[in-house]
Image: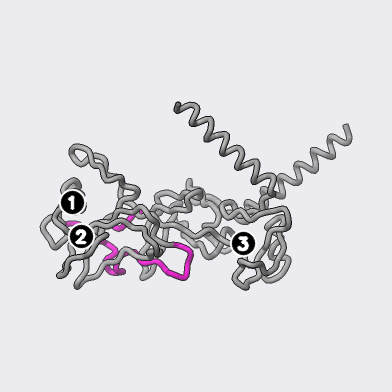
Amino acid sequence: MKQHKITTLIATIAALLLSCTTATRQCGNCGPHPVPYPLSTGPDCGDPSYKIRCTGGELWFDSLAGSSYTIKSVDPETRRIIIRPATLDKGACVSSDFHSEGISLNETLPFFIATGNTVFLLNCTISTPHAPPIDCSMSSLCHSYIKDHADTYACERVGTCCAYKTGGPHKEYEVRLRGVGGCAAYLSVVDFNGVVGPQGKGWPEPGVAVEWVAPQEPVCKEPVDCNALLNSKCGVGPTSGGLQRCLCNAGFKWDPTNGLCQGQTQIQSQISSKLKAKFKLKMIIY
């Protein structure tokens, strides 16, 4: 009986330590919205390089030149943030973030424009035709979008419109607007399959997908800096870029999704559980 109490006490202490580690590394909710690691809403949680903003119970993503966008959703598995793009000025085919030339991300930070956005550039004054993948022809998808959305009526008879999909061999950091020789407005949808139903039904809600690079281990200056990350020690590793980081001990592996040093047996167990779940889903489907 005594041995059982000791075992239970040890298990409880271990669980508390693990929960404290998670709570220390991961930020608390912003209103009703969870803030998964490595996103950071303050100096004492998350990874400071992955800064977003919590204001009035809503999450915000700040870009260069002073423009900010509300965050619609966050998916830690795909490392994607869906932000709400700028609206059009009332009665004009001009985006409300035209003053900052659209969305522009800091290339020194770990965010970039994700693959899978269909971007419509509107009210363009382009004298020379664009080569693919940007389609500025009369059959461009942007014409269908304008026709099917009453709030874009001001764009129907001004300038040229174009459409393109994000993604390619190089990371993209902007949805760019320019006054002369460019475009004054844009709209965007995420993961659009190209199929629109009758009366314009089937268009996704407006959004721009922004992706983040998987984080490395936290930077440290001395051993005490790694106390919050169990099973790690401060040192320089082969992939730490010359910086001292909280490197996971032997038998543990860095988990960039949860910001933890996971035991190898625990990782294998998680993989096994996911494979079993997929197998069961296939059995149900068939």
**Residue hosting label 2:** 122
Q: Find the magenta span and give its range.
A: 84-111
Vertical position of residue 257 compared to residue 195: above or below: below
Camera-side residue of 193 and 8? 193
Question: In which quadrant of the rendered image does the C terminus lie?
Answer: top left
Q: Residue at point 89% right, 35% down?
A: 2
Asked if residue 6 lies in the magenta stretch, the reply is: no
Q: Main secondary structure of the magenta part?
A: loop
Camera-side residue of 252 and 81? 252
How many numbered circles does the render carry? 3
Callout 3 amino acid: Glu
Residue occupying the far left of the picture: 157
Residue 250: x and y in percent read 73, 57
Distance (Cα) linking label 2 and label 1: 9 Å
* Marking on residue 40: none
Callout 2 amino acid: Leu
Label 1 vs 3, first from the N-terminus: 1
Question: In which quadrant of the rendered image does the N terminus lie?
Answer: top right
Residue 47: x and y in percent read 56, 61
Mark 3 and mark 1 in contact (Cβ < 8 Å)? no
**How is colour applied across the structure in the image?**
one colour
**Residue hosting label 1:** 146
Q: Quadrant of residue 46?
A: bottom right
Residue 184: x and y in percent read 22, 65
Callout 1 amino acid: Ile
Residue 149 visible from this viewpoint: yes
